[in-house]
Image (cartoon, rainbow, N blue to C red):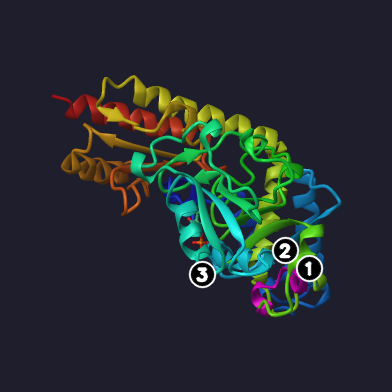
Amino acid sequence: MSHQEFRAINFGAGPGCIPDSVLLEAQKELLNFQGCGKSIMEVSHRGKEFEKVIQETKSNLIKVLSIPDDYDILFLQGGASSLFSGIPMNLCESPNDVVDFIVTGAWSKGASTDGKYFCKVNKVADMEPEKFLTVTDPSQWKFSPDSTYIHYCDNETVHGVEMPPSTPDHFPEGRIVVCDMSSNFLSKPVNVSKYDLIFAGAQKNAGISGITIVIIKKSLLTKTKPSVPSVFNFLKKSQNNSLDNTPPTFNIYITGLVLKWIIKEGGLEEMERRSIEKSSNLYKFIDGSNGFYRCGIDAKYRSRMNVVFRIQDGNEQLEEKFVKEASKHNITDIKGHRSVGGLRVSLYNAITVDQTKKLIEFMTSFMNENKQ
Ligand SMILES: Cc1ncc(COP(=O)(O)O)c(C=O)c1O
């Protein structure tokens, strides 16, 4: 049986789908990595095999994102959530420092909740009262006059809200800009120089869970105090090429394979082109369904990565049936996040335009069979 016959169309929000060719490559090399007689999981993180993997992964990330020379790349453990405390630990001088948070969904809210143990939290905008369905106009954002940095989430995975690329242009000049790009990382070209720190858990578009990638402006590293614990200490990580303790070697290797796949497929311009095609096909179909399917997110902020929607304005029975019937078509992982319910389809890089078309075909027949 070829893998195409049993592989699910996995629309999961993360850990999400990985390109088949990446998994096959990892499988091929599993017992004997490049002729060394061991798997990449069994070699020293300080040995020549892994040294090559980490350097290649870094240089391919620099190539793919055009990362300028004055930035460093760190590979951290603890998930993207660990950065919700790790970042203020490194960047704030004292708990009296003010940090500006733009709260547009569950993950920026989470960052502001953890942040309050390390800094004073100023919510520049808080979209929770609007159920995270939209974002207030930047002209109304209330920045603190002297925040240590600004934190926002480029793509809210749970609520399906994606910020426009122009977002940092609305920030007061000279502020340090921190961006959680966990769920749209590597899905489009990014002007890295607009940011001081970008972080992303790998398990959406960049590999598997277990590493968080940090792209940090080198000048920020001097802010880290010696008292910051080693596992969170950006300066120490940078000085030691993320190898001061044992890094998640297999995870870095997989990210390296994913980056090679992105390059082979045409880079981030191509990833963006595909994501626009996939998401606009799906949103167009949802909007044209006469309310059978409905996406409540303000059209300006709809995510290309995580499409959240309801059936008949929240008919839970029908939504359950939808999930069940979808699985008969090999379409999986489409339940909404437990905190919001409904349905969510994640269109990460490894999901193809054709797979999205198959989903729309299924949605069409489900609608025709179930509408009153
Ligand atoms: C945007 C965003 N930020 C942070 C996180 C937290 O990541 P982790 O589970 O790796 O801690 C997630 C997880 O889905 C996410 O989507």
The amino acid on which the numbered mark 3 sits, given as a three-letter code, is Tyr
SS class, disc 1: helix
Identify the disc placed on residue 259: none
Say whether mark 2 is within 8 Å of ligand 1: no
- Labels 1 and 3 touching (C-beta < 8 A): no
Front position in the image: 225 or 258: 225
Looking at the image, residue 347 sits to the left or right of residue 258; the answer is: left
Q: Which of marks 1 and 2 is nearer the N terminus?
A: 2
**Measured from the top left, where is residue 14 in percent x and y?**
47, 54
Q: Can residue 248 be seen in this view?
A: yes
> Mark 2 or 3 closer to N-term?
2
Question: Secondary structure under badge 2?
Answer: strand
Can you tell which of label 2 and label 3 is closer to the viewer? 3
Q: Residue furthest right?
A: 69
Marks 1/2 in contact by CB < 8 Å: the verdict is yes
Q: Which amino acid does label 1 sit on?
A: Ser
352 lies left or right of 231: left
Q: Assess whether residue 232 is covered by the magenta stretch.
A: yes
- Under mark 2, the amino acid is Leu
Residue on which disc 3 sits: 117
Instruction: Find residue 348 and report its horizontal and vertical position in percent.
Output: 53, 43
Q: Residue at x 63, y 53 (%)?
A: 147
Q: Which class describes the residues within 10 Å of circle 3: few (<14), some (14-19), or many (20+)?
A: few
Callout 1 environment at 10 Å: few (<14), some (14 to 19), or many (20+)?
some
- Estimate the spatial distance between the alpha carbons at disc 1 and disc 3, rounded to whole Å: 25 Å
The foreground one among 352 and 208 is 208
Q: Which quarter of the rendered picture does the C terminus lie within?
A: top left
Disc 1 marks which residue? 238
Q: How crowded is mark 2: few (under 14 residues within 10 Å), some or many (20 or more)?
A: many
Bounds of the magenta span?
229-237
Up the image or down, 272 lies above or below 202; here it is above
What is the number of the mark on residue 74? 2
